[in-house]
Image (cartoon, rainbow, N blue to C red):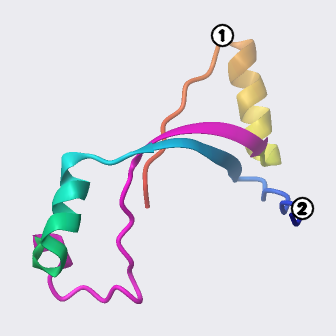
Amino acid sequence: MAPLPACRPDEILVRVDALGLCASDAKMVRLGLEYPLFFARDFAAHPAQLGHEAALTVVQFGLLLLLTYAANKAAGGNAGAVEQD
């Protein structure tokens, strides 16, 4: 396996440990191109990304985020959330 590239200062590298599909994802699969958000969508330019409920493990922090993480931890802990693009 090739080595992973280093994160940029404002990035976090994560490993996806589990991924969940919700009812909307299942509806997208069932309806295909008839799903309202898929109408006239250019899938080559904008592919659908299903599965937005994930359990992640942080593998690497970029320098800026590492400093923020360390400061937050010193202040009593960390919590995080991920928003899909």
Q: Residue at x 79, y 34 (%)?
A: 67
Q: Residue at x 16, y 59 (%)?
A: 27
Q: Secondary structure at mark 2?
A: loop
The residue at which mark 2 appears reads as 3
Rounded to the nearest angstrom, the CA distance separating label 1 from label 2 is: 33 Å
Q: Which residues are magenta?
A: 36-60
> Residue 78: x, y in percent?
61, 22
Query: What quarter of the picture does the N terminus occupy?
Result: bottom right
Q: Residue at x 84, y 63 (%)?
A: 5
- Asked which quadrant contains residue 38, the reply is bottom left
Q: Residue furthest top?
A: 76
- The kind of residue tagged 2 is Pro
The residue at which mark 1 appears reads as 76
Query: What quarter of the picture does the C terminus occupy?
Result: bottom left
Q: Residue at x 78, y 53 (%)?
A: 9
> Residue 40: x, y in percent?
18, 89
> Residue 49: x, y in percent?
39, 65
Q: Is residue 13 left or right of residue 53?
A: right
- Asked which quadrant contains residue 72, the reply is top right
> Per the image, is 25 magenta?
no
